[in-house]
Amino acid sequence: SQTIHQWPATLVQPVGSPLSLECTVEGTSNPNLYWYRQAAGRGLQLLFYSVGIGQISSEVPQNLSASRPQDRQFILSSKKLLLSDSGFYLCAWSRSGQGVHGYTFGSGTRLTVV
Amino acid sequence: AQSVTQPDIHITVSEGASLELRCNYSYGATPYLFWYVQSPGQGLQLLLKYFSGDTLVQGIKGFEAEFKRSQSSFNLRKPSVHWSDAAEYFCAVGSDAYTGFQKLVFGTGTRLLVSP
C-alpha cells in the first residue's frame, strides 16, 4: 500500500533562518506531489506542485521554494524565513496520468517562526 | 473558471443530532467530487468520493453525500453526530473534461463544532 511521510511534525525557527521540510511517498511511482499551507483559521493554499523529477510549478509568489530531487521526494525550502511563513504545511500526493485522482495527505508540519 | 463553495464557515450541532454540510460547485462538465476531514493539527483524510453511478455515496465514519446535478451540490450528511466528529471538512472537485494534469479545487472548509 502507499504511504506518505512528512517531517518534522513541529518546528520552531527564528526569523531569517533557513527551512527544509521533507515529504516522501512509498508504494507508488511517478506520483504528482503537492505542498499546501494553512494559515491559522484559513483554508488550504496550494504553494507548489510537481508532476515529475525536477518539474516544479509555483502557484503563488513567496519566500519559499520547492524541489523534487527524486521521484518520490518533495522538499519545501526557504533561505530566510519570515514571520509570515508561520503556518501548517501539508504535503500530498496523487496518481499521475489521465483523469482525476484523489489526494492523500501527510500528517503536516506546524511551523512557527519567532 | 472552476470553483467550489462551502457557504458555512462554522456549524454547531448537538451530539446525536443530524448533520448536513453544504458544498456547491461550478463546473462545465461532469465533476469528480470529494469530501475530506481534518482533525486539529492533522492532515486531511478522505471521507468519500463520487465519480459516477449511484448519486448517494457512502463513506467512512458513517458519512454519506448526495450528488445533485440539478443543484450543482454535493452535500455531506450524517444521521447522528458524535463528539469525535468535531473537525474541519473540505469539499473538493475535479473534472475529466481536461487532458493532462489537473489539480483538485478545494473549498474553504467548514468547521464543525459538536455541543454536548
Image (cartoon, rainbow, N blue to C red):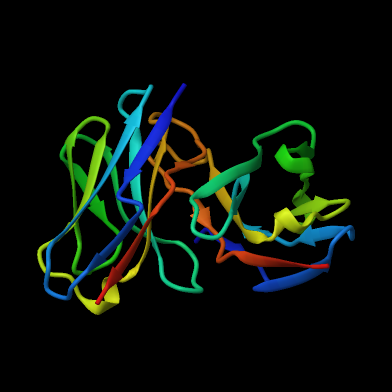
The residue under the point 39% across, 36% down is A4
A23, A11: nearer the viewer: A11
The answer to whether one can see residue B72 in this image is no
The residue under the point 82% across, 55% down is B81
Q: Is residue A34 above or below residue A28?
A: below
Q: Is residue A85 above or below residue B77?
A: below
Left or right: B56 with respect to A96? right
The answer to whether one can see residue B105 in this image is yes
Left or right: A77 with respect to B26? left
**Percent position (x, y) of residue B86?**
69, 60
**Percent position (x, y) of residue A84?**
28, 77
B42, A75: nearer the viewer: B42
**Percent position (x, y) of residue B95?**
54, 43
Left or right: A60 with respect to B68? left
A7, B62: nearer the viewer: A7
The residue under the point 56% across, 61% down is B107
The residue under the point 79% across, 42% down is B62
**Percent position (x, y) of residue B92?**
57, 52
